[in-house]
């Protein structure tokens, strides 16, 4: 079924955008499993408008992101419940759950 944008025009890009977003998510998780920082960081937008959500709430920006400097990796990462919703051509909204376990951290 073609994606219908707010303008009412059909777009064939929604399935492609959704597939690409899913591929990027899987690339991100694989980079974490392999502890490949360059590949991990390459899956994020290198921009002041990068939106990140965490324990402290929403934060913006790539330059001040602690993950760029942090050298720790979880021993185990379990990613589940990924949902990707096409919003407009070239734009998707995704969410998922990730549980990272580190030794000695509860």
Image (spheres, rainbow, N blue to C red):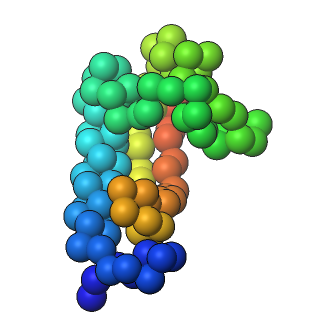
Residue 17, image x and y in percent?
30, 60
> In this image, 35 relative to 60: left or right?
left
Question: In which quadrant of the rendered image does the N terminus lie?
Answer: bottom left
At 28% from the left and 27% from the top, the residue drawn is 39
Residue 88, image x and y in percent?
43, 65
Of 77 and 91, the residue lying toward us: 91
> In this image, 81 relative to 42: left or right?
right
At 30% from the left and 19% from the top, the residue drawn is 38
Tell me, yes or no, if residue 75 can be seen here: no
At 33% from the left and 42% from the top, the residue drawn is 29
Residue 54, image x and y in percent?
66, 40
> In this image, 5 relative to 22: left or right?
right
Res 35 → quadrant:
top left
Q: Residue furthest right?
A: 56
At 49% from the left and 50% from the top, the residue drawn is 98
Q: Is residue 49 above or below residue 71?
A: below
Of 8 and 50, the residue lying toward us: 8
Residue 7, image x and y in percent?
48, 76
């Amino acid at each position: 079924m073609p994606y219908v944008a707010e303008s009412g025009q059909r777009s064939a890009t929604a399935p492609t955008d959704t597939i690409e977003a899913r591929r990027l998510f899987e690339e991100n998780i694989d980079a974490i499993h392999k502890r490949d920082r360059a590949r991990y960081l390459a899956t994020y937008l290198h921009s002041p408008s990068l939106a990140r959500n965490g324990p402290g709430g929403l934060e913006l920006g790539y330059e001040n992101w602690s993950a760029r400097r942090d050298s720790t990796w979880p021993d185990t990462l379990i990613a589940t419940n990924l949902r990707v919703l096409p919003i407009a051509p070239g734009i998707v909204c995704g969410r998922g759950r990730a549980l990272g376990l580190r030794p000695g951290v509860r």
